[in-house]
Image (spheres, helix red, strand yellow):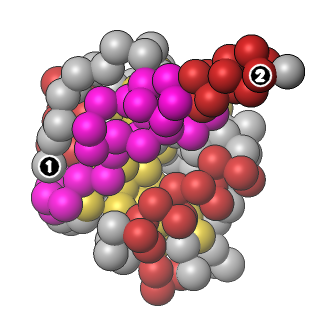
Amino acid sequence: MIRTIGFIILFISHRAFSCSPGWTPFGNSCYHVSADQESWMVGMRMCEMHGGYIVHIESQSEDDFIRHLMKHNGIEKSWLGGSDWTIEGMWVWEPDGHSFLYSNFAHGQPNNYHGENCLSMEHGHSYKWDDDDCDNHKAYVCEKPDTGNVNGIIG
């Protein structure tokens, strides 16, 4: 019994510290909310520089986690990793091009207003998704695999 409890504590401790400082674990990934505000493309490059990509939200639980992470960090507007710039109205996760299996667009969104092609999450839409001009500056959320040996703090 004591051995089992010790193993559980060791597992939880390892899990809690498997992401590097500034990154938060959830599922099989580590997440970082940047305090910097950049265009969608610069946010993507910053995430790639640290072994990740702008977040791909693939479930309601991950969506809830990202919303909580943004609120906890005082972020009202953030880029997510989706775009429809290749084929208008066909949203995919960049850079791999996988189609959305889950989405949480705000009512009336996406609307392609003046050619909006990049995905964001905003407080003004109750943290639901919106399409936006890729050149606008917002915070961004990076995601990378939780390998237990993650390096790098950004933004």
Q: Residues within 10 Å of mark 2 (few under 14, many from 20)?
A: few
In the rendered image, the quadrant that contains the N terminus is top right
Which x, y percent locates residue 34? Answer: 23, 53
x then y, percent, for residue 146: 47, 22
Residue under circle 2?
Answer: 2
Residue 23, image quadrant: top left
Classify 47 as above or below 34: above
On the image, the x and y values in percent for residue 18 come to 43, 25
Magenta segment, which residues? Answer: 13-39
**107 to 112, vertically: above or below:** below
Residue at 73% from the left image edge and 37% from the top image edge: 101
Which residue is pictured at 68% across the width and 18% down the height? 7
The disc label shown at residue 155, or none? 1
Q: Say what amino acid the circle numbered 2 marks.
A: Ile
Identified at 53% across, 81% down, the residue is: 125
Q: Nearer the viewer, residue 7 or 85?
A: 7
Q: Nearer the viewer, residue 3 or 69?
A: 3
CA–CA distance in space, label 2 to label 1? 42 Å
Q: Residue 76: give x, y in percent of width and height.
A: 36, 76
Could you say which quadrant of the image residue 127 lies in?
Answer: bottom right
